[in-house]
Structure formats: C-alpha cells, structure tokens
Image: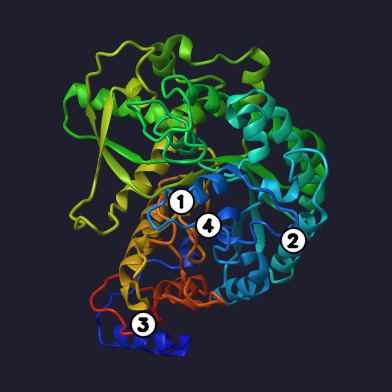
Amino acid sequence: MRVSSKFLLLSLLAEVCFGKYTPTKFSRNDFPSGFVFGAGTSAYQVEGAAAEDGRTPSIWDTFANSGKLPDKSSGNIASDEYHKYKEDVQLMKEMGLDAYRFSIAWSRLLPNGRGAINPKGLQYYNNLINELISNGIQPHVTLFHYDIPQALEDEYRGWLSPKIVKDFKEFADVCFREFGDRVSHWTTLNEANIFVIGGYDSGIFPPKRCSYPYGFDCTGGNSSLEPYMAGHNCLLAHAAAATLYKKKYQAKQHGLIGLSLLVYWLTPLTNSEDDVRATQRANDFYTGWFVNPLVFGDYPDTMKKIAGPKIPSFTKYQSKQLMGSSDFIGVNHYRSMNVKHSQNNQMTSQRDFLGDMFAETIEKRDGTPVGEFPLVPSGMQGVLEYFKEVYGNPPIYIHENGYSTPSNETLDDDTRRVTYLSEYMESMLNAIRNGSDTRGYFIWSFLDCFELFNGYQSRYGLYYVDFKDKDLKRYPKFSAHWYSNFLKGNKEIGIVKPTESPNSHVPQ
Ligand code: IFM
C-alpha cells in the first residue's frame, strides 16, 4: 500500500494535536539570516548509469563490484539520479531546500582521469546544475567523494603519488571553468581524513590498501606509512585546486571553496591525565592532521613527534599556500567517542596510523540501545565549539549529519530520525548562539542511496527509495515532511519526541 503525503501529514498533525509530540523549541527564524539548509548525496551513491554515456570506473566501482559488501551490491544503478534528476529536483523544491550538495564523478567528466572531456558527462552536470538553479536551489558541489578514476589508480596508485596533484588541479579547473558561473560553494575533498584512514590503514574503503595485521583482504599497502603519504597528497591537491580557484575564478564567479572532514566529538573516558592527553592526541590525528595545515600551515606537533620521518613535511611555499586555501571547513558529524589511553610498544615504523595515536576510541551512546544509531546531540555543539576555540572560529558548513536505519525500514520507523535531526540541529543552534560561525546545515542524505559500508542494507534518506521497484520510486519519509515543515517556517509541526509512529508502510 502506497501511503500519500497528505495522509502522513494528517497523521503527523493528529499526533501534535493529541499531544504525542512536543513542538520543536526552535524555528528556522532562530538561525542567522542567510543560513543555508540543504541535503546531500554523492555521485557514486545515487547516480547509477555507471557504464553509460562514456563514464569509466572509479576505485569505488572496483571496490563495490568485487562483491565484498555484505549484500554484494554496487552503485551500478544506485538511486538512478542520472536519469531521474529532474524528478529529484522537483522533490527538493517541494521540500523547500535552499541547497543541494552533490559530487561530480571525475571519471564521468574525464574518463581517462585527465585530457578529453566526455561531452555527455559535461551535459549531465550542466543539466543538473541548471535544473537546480531554475528551481531556486543552490548547487554546493564536491569534487572528490571516494571515487578517483580507476585509470589513475592503475597508472600511479592515485593518492599515493604526487602526480595526483596536477591531475586533480586539472579536473578542478575543468569544473570551475564549465560550471563555476552557477556554483556558489565548492568542496575539494569529502571527508579526506576518513577516506585516507579507511582506504590506506584499515583497508575497509576503496582502494582497500592496508597491511596485516591492521587490515585484511588488502590489495597491497603499508598501514604504517601510506596513510601519511596519501593524506599529504590530499592536502597538496586541495591547496593546488583552491589556489587556482582563488587566482583565476573567484573574483568573477564569487564562490567559496573549502575542504570537508569527518569529525567525531571526542571526550576522555575518565578524568585521568592519560585519557585527557589521549583525547588531545586523537583530536590531532583525526582532525588536526588536516585542519592544522589549513589554519597554521603545518601538521600538529604531536603528530610530527610521534610519527617522525613517516610524516612528510611541507615546503615554505606549500605551507603558505595551504594556510590561505579554505574559505570554510565542511564538517561531517554523526558520532561521539570516549577516548582511552592505550599503550603500544611497537616501534614507530611498525605501528599503523591509528596505533600512532596511542588512543582507543569507544563509541558513546548516552543510553541509545545497541542496534540503534547512537543519539548524542551534545556532540554537535562540542565539535563546533572546538573549532571556535582551537582554530579561531573559521566559517563552517555542516556538510553531513544524518541517521541510519536498517534496510527493512518502513516509513513508520522514521520518528527516531526526526528526533536525531531535531536534537542535533538544536545543538548546532546552541553553538551558533555561543558565537560559532556555522553557516549551513546539510542532512545526509536527501534520498536512500548506496552506502559506503553496507550497500543497500542501511538507509539514511529523507526520501525512501524502493530499490525493488524497477522505477526506483521515491516516497517521502516522516522526516521529509518534518524537515519541509521546518524549512517553511512552521514551528508547530517541528516534531521532537518520538512515541508511536504513523502506521504507514511502503511495499517491501
Ligand atoms: O554515506 C556516507 C558518505 O558517503 C560519507 N559520509 C558518511 C556517510 C554515511 O555513512
């Protein structure tokens, strides 16, 4: 049975009237003027059409098509946004989004990683951007989201080679030149820190490089060394692209450019000096690794001391280039961790990147039952205030924040997502009221899509996608209605407290 949006809205209103929910304590008018609310996706996770119109594989295609994910799925079809972008933009418009955050598939635009532009790829992104603009939605574009062209991985091992800097800059140049007249916000790399740790230390992400015992089923690699090399090249590639944008395009295109990271809120497990120090180290290794070079021009001292010669150094020129390279930091925040000091007696050269941290992280759940996505809203305020205090309050966009439910989710499971989102947004508002320069918030994800860890086994979307339906029909979840009401300034229907859920189901 397909349940209409009207039905959902009515049940939602009924819940409010009969007192099952309490109204949200804030409305969008409480946010600074110009604050941007949106939702996001990434190319490989939604586009599909993986082998269509001249696109070539990226490392993510290779990773997914090796059949290693729990459900043996891939993004070959995904949510088919390549063909359904017009429909999706209409849904965004109905929802009232200010902005859509999406990424450009490098290998769709430049199938060889460099050189000839694929005209069909160019056409697709022009169409998507034009459709967004003509519906009043700002495009916030990411250049790299886990999907380097396989051609460059094969040629020189992608992010491990300094050659990537020139190729990334060339790809960025094409994007700025072709799309920059309509794009207000560019992000060079998505979650650079976690992409590198997952891809080159534990090997759980593409390109699956790691060394035993830090990862298994590795495609080759060295977990002690490669994360530092790949991270360094990511920073230099970001700096090269951002400098190009600032010199050649920014004055006429008036956009902004930044880099995004996944940021945990880290707190010591106990008050012991050991745990407090371990927390600072963990912050430096996870976040400072990228943010210190962007703000202060160099890696954190802790990292340099512990990693010694494993961590490359910047020239004076590189350091200067990095410092001016980001107009904003994109923060992807989902989870909070307690940190415990851990002793590691291995020699530096044998320890992996995570071992160099001398810290163990333990997920904080604040009472959320195991099996459910943890709800620790104070983490959002914690992260934003950390940036304010440690990094001099740089402009921040929350690029991702969202709630995952299992794949057998029905629309009526969605009250927990609404609780999560509203409480994290309230926490963000508290940080803004305390002076944080946070300028935008994007829910991950706009619609259900192919997930990094587990294919279609979990769902983050505001829109439910029926992956069993050949048309991949989209259905608004309860959270889609909730967000839409919030965006339209309707305070009363901003639901906070979950009790029972509306009894609507989509076909399974
Ligand atoms: O789906 C991912 C996204 O690609 C990167 N950030 C985390 C999301 C949820 O796991």
**Secondary structure of residue under mark 3:** loop
The image position of residue 317, as x and y in percent, is: 68, 16
Q: Residues within 10 Å of mark 3 (few under 14, many from 20)?
A: some
Query: Which residue has dot 4 on it?
Result: 32
Q: Is residue 361 left or right of residue 71?
A: left
**Secondary structure of residue under mark 1:** loop
Q: Quadrant of residue 319?
A: top right
Q: Residues within 10 Å of mark 1 (few under 14, many from 20)?
A: few
Give the Cα separation between the discs numbered 3 and 4. 37 Å
Q: Residues within 10 Å of mark 2 (few under 14, many from 20)?
A: some
Q: Are marks 3 and 4 in contact (CB under 8 Å)?
A: no
Quadrant where the N terminus is found in the figure: bottom left
Q: Is residue 347 left or right of residue 489?
A: left
Q: Earlier in the sequence, mark 3 or mark 4?
A: 4
Tell me if I can see residue 178 in this picture. yes
The image position of residue 257, as x and y in percent, is: 66, 42
Q: Are marks 2 and 3 in contact (CB under 8 Å)?
A: no
Q: Are marks 4 and 2 in contact (CB under 8 Å)?
A: no
In the picture, the disc for residue 124 is 2
Task: Using the image, determine if residue 462 lies above or below residue 389.
Answer: below
Query: Which residue has dot 3 on it?
Result: 505
Query: Which residue has dot 1 on it?
Result: 67
Give the Cα separation between the discs numbered 1 and 2. 28 Å
